[in-house]
Image: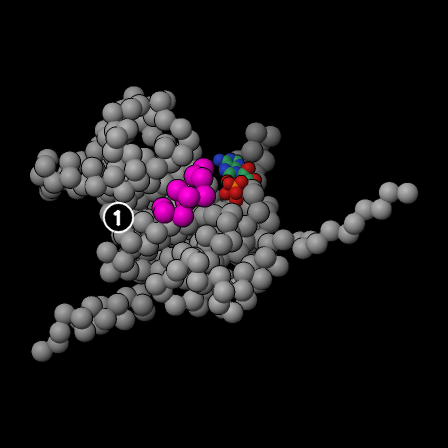
Amino acid sequence: MITELENEILIEKRSETSNCISVKNVTISFKTNGKGTFTAVKDIDLDIKKGEIVSIIGHSGCGKSTLMNSISGMVRPTFGEVTVNGSRVTGPGPDRGIVFQNYSLLPWMTVYRNVYEAVDSVLKNKSALEKKEIVEYNLKMVNLLQHKDKLPGQLSGGMKQRTAIARAFAINPSVLLLDEPFGALDALTKGSMHVELLKIWNLNKRQQTIVMVTHDIEEAIFLSDRVVVMNDGPEATIREIVDINIPRPRNKKDIVHLPEYMEVHDKLLSLLVKNLSIEDVIFE
Ligand SMILES: Nc1ncnc2c1ncn2[C@@H]1O[C@H](COP(=O)(O)OP(=O)(O)OP(=O)(O)O)[C@@H](O)[C@H]1O
């Protein structure tokens, strides 16, 4: 007879070996206006295990969103394939919640309605009361309950982004795809959203797979198990995948003093920043 805890560990161990997302030999080219093609990313191979948090980092325009969109199903690979939970991705699906950098809220619906519609279309077997509770819980989490009746046009950039985050969290998908989700937020809100994200991940027994595009090295280290560093495009490839071996739970204030943190921070900086210092210019 095994205990509940042993059972959970067994499940976790089993899931550690199974890939949730598999990007196989993916190349993505776009048609350009002048009848040519532009290859954004080339020959990408990336396996992400169930329950992993993986960040994608790289310079602006290198193809992070393109790679992410091949997982969300918004962009079809020109070559290669992406599978999620064993099924080939052919379009968006309710198993993947997405937060874009440009919010993507429906402008004619209130904050409450934007979240409710998503919950209503995905969690069909919940009662109306349960759906209302889920929406309110998630709006409270992002501090927007008091603004629930506003339209997107009446919100600040950060508030729009928080609405989009609440909407993605509310449907509790097995895969959460976050494209610079916290980019528009002030440092304090960003910090508390990081904690909320990890809280939700823990509540789901760390079984939810999270892929996040970011420009923020500290954010990537705090949240991730691995950081995928991309080369510049066109024809961008994966430059290196860096493991973040910092034990969880992580405390933002404490981890920065750990040798593992400093080592991985240095490594990411040197992979991403070409010139770490500038020569003083001497005017004669
Ligand atoms: N639909 C499209 N048609 C043509 N080119 C595209 C399309 N989508 C993306 N690209 C090009 O692909 C390249 C990668 O774009 P992508 O948005 O993936 O970069 P990114 O790394 O996410 O950038 P950022 O960090 O600035 O958001 C860019 O050169 C972009 O212009």
Residue nearest the observer in this picture, 260 or 243: 260
* Residue 95 located left or right of residue 276: left
Q: Is mark 1 on a helix, strand or loop?
A: loop
**Residue 55, relative to residue 12: is it above or below?**
above
Q: Which residue is drawn at 24% across and 60% down?
A: 205
Q: How many labels does the image show?
A: 1
**Residue 88, relative to residue 101: is it above or below?**
below
Q: Which residue lies furthest to the right in this view?
A: 284
* Residue 22 located left or right of residue 172: right
Residue nearest the observer in this picture, 167 or 15: 167
Q: Which secondary structure dominates the residues rendered in magenta?
A: helix
Q: Name the residue beneath numbered marker 1.
A: 173
User: Are there few (<14), some (14-19), or many (20+) residues within 10 Å of tag 1?
Assistant: some
Span of residues in magenta:
184-193
Q: Specify whether tag 1 is near ligand 1 (CB below 8 Å).
A: no
- Where residue 126 appears, as percent x and y from the top left, is 11, 41
Quadrant location of the C terminus in the rendered image: top right
Q: Residue at x 26, y 37 (%)?
A: 139
Q: Quadrant of residue 180?
A: top left
Residue 191 located within the stretch drawn in magenta: yes
- Where residue 142 appears, as percent x and y from the top left, is 30, 40
Q: Residue at x 29, y 24 (%)?
A: 150
